Image (cartoon, rainbow, N blue to C red):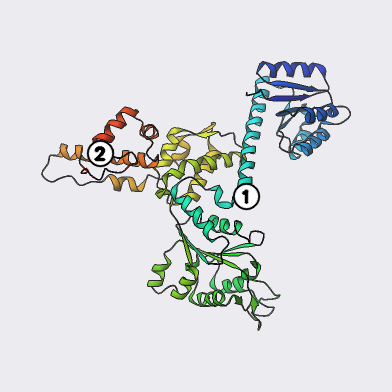
Amino acid sequence: MRTNPRVLIVDDNLMNRKLLSAVFESQGFAVGLAEDGEQALAALVAEPPAAVLLDLQMPGLSGTDTLERMKSLSPHLPVIMLTSHADVPAAVESIKRGAYDFLSRPVNNDKLVLTVRRALEHHQLLGQVEGLKRQLDSVGSLARFATSSPEIQQIVSQIQLVTDSTVTVLIQGETGTGKELVARSIHQQSNRAKKPFVAIDCGAIPDNLLESELFGHEKGAFTGAERRKDGHFQLAQGGSLFLDEVANLSPSIQAKLLRVLQERQLQPLGSARSVPLDVRFIAATNDSLEEQVTAGRFRQDLFYRLAEFTILVPPLRARKEDILPLAKRFQEEASIELHRNVCGISEPAIEILMRHSWPGNVRQLRNVIRQAVLQTAGPMIEAKDIQSRVKTHPARAAQTSVTAPMGISLKEVADHAAVEAEKQAILEALQATRGNKSQAARLLKVDYKTLHVKIKRYHLQPNGALQPSIKNGG
């Protein structure tokens, strides 16, 4: 049975306690009262409240000291400070010490209740994020983006196959699909999890510096080498080294990397000795290394060394069912991080998200949602908050561009094009909702019966495919 949230009112003034108690009881809250800091701390232990209204100026234990003691007992408890105008600097200091907000007396009752409700929502979201973080710690970084889609579940299965092996893993996928998350998950679920995970972007460092960054150097190895420096290989000792955008390596670095992979030891620049390596190698690229090998830009022998096991991360447009759960997860995270009271995404905004092709993949989706959370004026992300941040779906026009039969009238051409466009829209909606007709009808803004009739008319299967035994007619 759901209980009313309990608010603890801490104030040395009896009249203030009675007035505030009446205000919150009239709004359906349970109320606890304390006349000083010591009583408040005892009440906190005996019957923990959902939120606290705390007077800043009290005899004995001050409001600031009471706040600190409360935070030591319950770090995430929302505490709202009540102050006079003269106490504003002290109230601001209390925010730094963990108070949720402060309000200056005289306080508008509606504003006070609204502030408490927002504090409770913030606390609830914070609890959800903390729970998510605990899940991440237990199952790896990929959990942040993991969904129930078959593509992601296949990646999870592949990760489990290689976590405790010594094979070198090559992760392929477009920019922004989450290749580094896959690499971190491999590391975090392996027996090397307590050792370093070292990542280097092979395309972000100039060739003349990359060799030193990877292999390290001795003092005096080259001009400017004023002291000895360990390279990324050595920094990853016992753990995992992630080579991102490995296709950008120059031929000379490719040759030296191949030798390290073969011999499991390296020779720092300017050194006559070799250093044994115990490192798990994981590489990633947004290019096809096979094509790079064919074009002569990447060593075939190095490719075979890197691709002992390959994981392909599909683009977001190929797994539309992941868009909505990811967007909601990003909205919740951003609401906490940016201190915004945004609680959801409207249906029109969801429709835009589902139609977009997401060329920047998961990274682009996260950025769009974060910007929308930051700038939306209401409690929900609306279509206008999304529309300005995504371009028109480039694939849609191409998909609905059809060739009409020759020898028919212009009106018949238009009718034929309309039918094909409608059929394509239904296909996309069914695919996006994994065959859920009710959800597809909402996306298309039609009633369920109309959609059902059109699915039968166009011989579509519930999963958004054409029935193979029937011709694709209009």
Front residue of 331/50: it is 50
Give the image location of residue 358, x and y in percent. 43, 48
The amino acid type found where label 1 is placed reads Ser
Give the farthest residue toward the bottom: 272
The residue where tag 2 is placed is 459
| First in residue order: circle 1 vs circle 2 | 1
Give the image location of residue 231, x and y in percent. 63, 71
Cα–Cα span, label 1 and label 2? 46 Å
The amino acid type found where label 2 is placed reads His
Q: Is residue 32 visible?
A: yes
Give above or below for 417 relative to 88. Answer: below
The residue where tag 1 is placed is 138
Front residue of 275/162: it is 162
Which element carries disc 1, helix, strand or loop? helix
Quarter of the C terminus within the rendering: top left
Q: Are marks 1 and 2 in contact (CB under 8 Å)?
A: no
